[in-house]
Image: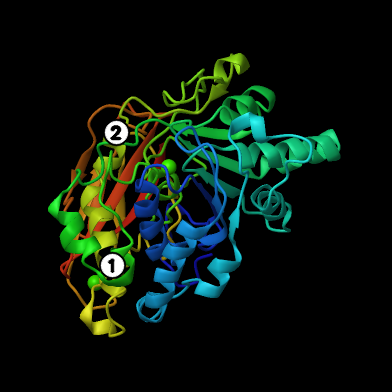
Amino acid sequence: MPGPTATPSPLNTRRPIRQKPRIINTTDLGADPDDEQSMVRFLVCSNEFDTEGLIVATGCWKKSQSNTNMLDKIVNAYGQVYDNLKNHADGYPTPEYLRSISVMGQRGYGMGDVGTGKDSTGSEMIIAAVDKDDPRPVWVGGWGGVNNVAQAVWKVQKTRSAAELKKFLSKLRVFDILGQDDAGAWLAKNFPDLFYIRATGVYGWQPSKNDPYLRTHIQSHGPLGAVYPNTKWATEGDTPAFMHVYPNGLNDPGQIDQGGWGGRFSFTKKANIKSMSGVKTEMRFAPYSMYGNTSDGAKAIKRWSAGYNNDFEARMDWTMTSDYSKANHHPVAVVNGDTTRQVLEASASAGSSLTLSAAGSSDPDNNSLTYKWSFYQEPSSYKGPVSIKNRSSASVTVVIPSNASGKNIHMILELHDNGSPNLYAYRRVIINVK
Ligand SMILES: [Ca+2]
Ligand SMILES: [Ca+2]
């Protein structure tokens, strides 16, 4: 709530202060080496999340798993750089904590390993996380197949009442990369209320195979760089699963059509989104419906490429030194006095003007800031042009079109510092036009 001296603001700031998203990653490590790449990126970003599980999973490209050795190797590398990382940002989990949540999931493939007697440490971890007395949803990323989620939901259905199952499902969010077993179709078919995204626009946003960026800024950087393998097929295909949830100010991950670093999705469910070619048995569950990408596909990710590439680069720099002054750190974007990273809402009349101010934005390294305000047309229900005065200054005036009544206008503030590499901060203001 604004204090008594605050300037009256049209923004709705009655939202909770920033909270970390809760996340569990399930990964078919050992199939495509890109899971190892994604895990390195995830760990250097891990201060942004409450990570509640790192689960070794199967998938159509790796149909059995027997140990957590590959995961342990990457977490151990994180352990070697943890003392440096924690000097650059608050909130990094200890290596001991990450080891305690690094577990085996289902050892076998797909729905063939779901049912009586098939509970795994991973499936039990998913149940325990969702059951926690915590109002935040649990985001489970499927970097391979999702039969750990299926086993968890199967067990809850078998052992609890319909009302308890409904409550359980209401706290679960599944972000499936491409469909890598038949468990996703089973879940979507049998539990149509389950919040289930199947992302297919997951290629083309990342630096290409053998791009010098990876050698120069990632692989050359210490113990975590050393466990970032070369690309075999595509770089980091599974990374959008956590980038969608990354709390950078750009999007509310529950509002899947807003668009952020993980892409943009439609609330109109699509029927029978096909899995990867290695999955042969899912059509027995058709018809099934899931949230899928909007038509902008991976372009919805790539538009932010300077932001996420430089973010990863800077975080890898952090792993190399305990000296705060030797690396760059993210600026903080403030809009109309709101210092959180929540998406803001405002209302304005058609034909009026609305001022949005990023005054008070700052940088912990005292870098200078460059502002860019833009109208993000794709998620906006108003599709026409929107005039923005002084779009490169901290304070802008948005001219609300006279024919925008009843529509909304998504305004994005993208600011960056002049450190090396330039680091970005974002805010979104959704203007509801009266
Ligand atoms: Ca994978
Ligand atoms: Ca900075």
Residue wearing tag 1:
316
- Closer mark to the observer between disc 1 and disc 2: 1
- Circle 1 — which element? helix
Q: Which amino acid does the dot numbered 1 rest on?
A: Met
Q: Which quadrant does the C terminus fall into?
A: top left
| Residue at figure coordinates x 56%, y 54% from the top left | 67
Q: Nearer the viewer, residue 212 or 421?
A: 212
State the image quarter where residue 222 is shown. bottom left
| Residue at x 26%, y 35% (from the top left corner) | 299
Q: 96 and 402: which one is in front?
A: 96
Q: Secondary structure at mark 2?
A: loop
Q: Is mark 1 within 8 Å of ligand 2?
A: no
- Ligand 2 near label 2 (Cβ, under 8 Å)? no
Name the image colouring: rainbow
Disc with the residue nearer the chain's start (1 vs 2): 1
Q: Is residue 226 left or right of residue 9?
A: left
Q: Is residue 420 visible?
A: yes
Name the image quarter holding the N terminus.
bottom right
Q: Which residue shows up at 69% across the image and 39% down it?
A: 151
- Against 110, residue 86 (above or below) is below
Q: Quarter-wise, where is residue 247 in the image?
A: bottom left
The x and y percentages for residue 153 are 71, 38
The disc at residue 163 is none
Residue kind at label 2, given as amino acid type: Gln
Residue 89 horizontal side relative to residue 288, left or right: left
Marks 1 and 2 sit apart, C-alpha to C-alpha, by 33 Å
User: Which numbered marker is on residue 377?
Assistant: 2
Task: Left or right? Give the position of 298 relative to 162.
Answer: left
> Residue 342: image x %, image y %?
45, 55
